[in-house]
Amino acid sequence: MSRICKVKDILIGEGIPKVCVPVISDNHQSIITDLIRLKDLEIDLIELRIDYFKELLNHQKLSELFKMIASLEMKQALILTYRSVKEGGLGNLSHEEYINLYSLALESGAFDIYDVELSSGTNTIITLNNMIHELNCKVIMSNHDYTRTPSLDTMLEKIKQMDSLEADIIKLAVMPEDYKDVLLVLEMTLRANEIHDKPIVTMSMSNLGTATRILGEQFGSAITFGKDHDASASGQIDVRSLNMMLKIIHENN
């Protein structure tokens, strides 16, 4: 099995970490404006945080938004992410509503990758994975802990669970209390890459964890999240500075 996940012409898991910028606008026009602005930026992926959208239960509005996004024909790979409250987002949909949301998005063909939360439960995960893979899209399975950094064994077990549930890309984000926690995440990332043959994305959030956002090539984190205007999580670096730092580190590696 290859460690590389190819989406469009982007090889996730190879070389410099791929740069992703989240869009967290809450209405149709602002989302489209943001995407058009980001279209010309030197980034690989764009994540639409759909849990910020004010009309999340309005299927007509969602369908119109997704069709408009599809018509933009973005060069970057697009990730659709619904982040629940329990994983640090704004979403409080039922499992059925969560599945319906992704079904509507899949019908539009607007997105290349879908974020599926580990905390959704096995039945929901299997349903979503089958829907997503049936249309040849990719699953980035994610788990977030905004309160602490779990033990090394606990984090590796989370990675193992996501691998076993047929994630194409595995993402784990945790909150550090000190720099020892940051070092633990870097060690965990190295170990996880020795065990698993899929792209792994890890980060230690907040400003304490900045190192984890720029050292992915050295420690094995395949995607790093930067900001253009507004950040979707604490510790995200301006994407222009992020690109510069990644290139400097790559050239001197």
Image: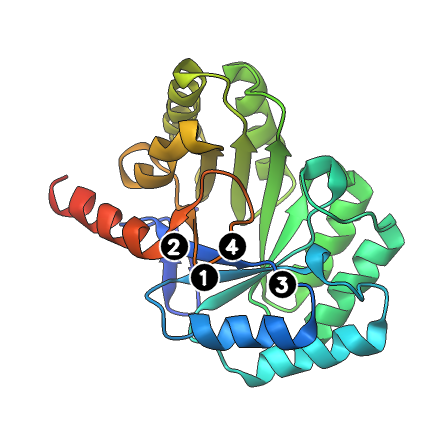
Give the residue pinned by disc 1: 45
Residue 97 visible in the picture: yes
Give whichever of 223, 148 is nearer the camera: 148
Give the residue pinned by disc 2: 19
Say whether disc 1 or disc 2 marks the residue closer to the N-terminus.
2
Image coordinates for residue 99, horizontal then vertical, percent: 80, 57
Give whichever of 237, 182 is nearer the camera: 237
Q: How many angstroms separate mark 1 from mark 2 (CA)? A: 6 Å
Give the residue pinned by disc 3: 25
Give whichever of 89, 104 is nearer the camera: 89
Image coordinates for residue 120, horizontal then vertical, percent: 76, 41
Say whether disc 2 or disc 3 marks the residue closer to the N-terminus.
2
| Callout 4 amino acid | Asp
Say whether disc 4 or disc 3 marks the residue closer to the N-terminus.
3
| Residue at the front extreme, as displayed | 229
At 46% from the left and 35% from the top, the residue drawn is: 203
| Callout 3 amino acid | Ser
Asked whether the beta carbons under mark 1 and mark 2 sit within 8 Å of each other, the answer is: yes
| Callout 2 amino acid | Val
Give the residue pinned by disc 4: 230
Q: How many angstroms separate mark 4 from mark 3 (CA)? A: 9 Å
